[in-house]
Amino acid sequence: MILRTNVKLNLGLHVLRKRPDGYHDIETLFVPCHEYGDTLEVITGDDYSRTSAALFARYGNPYPEERLDHGEVHPRLAAAEYRLRPTAPQGNCFDLAQGISEDGKLMITIAREGGVDWDPLEDLCAKAYFLLAKDFDLPPVKIFLEKKAPVGAGLGGGSADAAFTLKALNELCGLDLPDECLSEYASRLGSDCAFFIWNRPMIGTGRGEILEPFDIDLSGYEVRVLVPEGVSVSTAEAYRGITPRFYEAEGNSGATNNSFEGKGAKTTVTLGTLRGGTGSEADGEVERSETVLAPLPLEDHRVKNILKRPVEEWKELLVNDFEETVFKAHPELAAIKRSLYDSGAVYASMSGSGSAMFAIYKKQ
């Protein structure tokens, strides 16, 4: 099964509060964007791959001195310790990476122009397979992924790959899992993975995994996406130093206080220690306490209510809170946003944690 994935854009993104688990509650609107995407092939058993030969032809075989036809794996590639094979002359640049699970049931091959610098068995596609394999007796699977979507741009390309892998395995392996169940599995892989199971406009709350359908009509507008070259922003970097809109009050036994008495009432809060795995917002460690003004939540300021207003009013109302921290570290992104407005956009914003920027123009 060969699939073309897509990415997402965030219309508005509010960081609401720090959670006891080291993550943050957010509110955003996810919308599908088909301007970028990856090519994903998932095959089971001994089925023939139409992608592998093309990938090896474009990016090089895992061992260029040995011919591999139709995805055939040389015995040396089956070693559990085998991970990455550089095909480009640059020191740490890997154009094609391949990994095989210890039990030999999963082979995953990833190709990316400019380099694959992560372990294929740690890719979200592989994690999607392992997640389902815990609960179901899956057959041997080969995954071929050609990455074209930008990495580190806040477009969710890796999350999309994982969600599409879940959907492919569900169909190929005859699991017959409903989308609600696939969405729950996807939420374990990443905060925005579940959105790609549904792949239609959805309000995301919680970590982004709690989804609510949202009707939005942009048929009278054109959306353009710009991904600056050489600028990559990790989610951990975007969260570092951000000021949530509401806080978790000290002495609250982990409960979220969202109803302080009086607008702007002072309270001492602790933004705990952030820890986590690669690619999560909790990467690294940050710990601080401070006394802050804790504003009451205003219903009119919620993302989904702002989005009900005319697009021309969004410029002053619809905010991506990550711009506060990311623009300080990457002022060129702020300059791009200004240039988008100068070019006639009625709304411009950063998507997710950046670095991708997008603009909405009124169709003539």
Image (cartoon, rainbow, N blue to C red):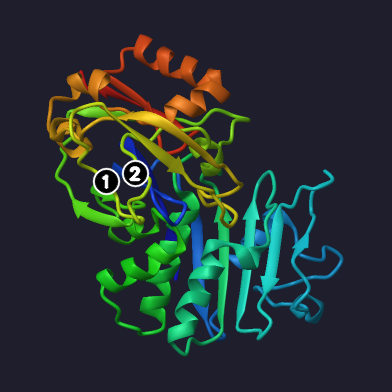
**Residue 140 locus on image (x, y percent):** 56, 85
- Considering every residue shown, the one lying at the far front of the view is 251
| Residue at figure coordinates x 50%, y 31% from the top left | 227
Q: Foreground residue, 263 or 207?
A: 263
**Circle 2 residue:** 249
Residue 225 appears in the figure = no
Q: Foreground residue, 183 or 247?
A: 247
Q: Horizontal placement of 192 versus 331: left or right? A: left
Give the alpha-carbon distance from disc 2 to disc 1, as whole Å.
6 Å
Residue 120 occupies which quadrant of the picture? bottom right
Residue 189 appears in the figure = yes
Residue 141 occupies which quadrant of the picture? bottom right
**Circle 1 residue:** 257
How many C-alpha atoms fall within 10 Å of the one at disc 1: few (<14), some, or many (≥20)? some
Figure check: 348 above or below 131: above
Disc 2 + disc 1, Cβ < 8 Å: yes
Report the amino acid beneath label 1: Asn
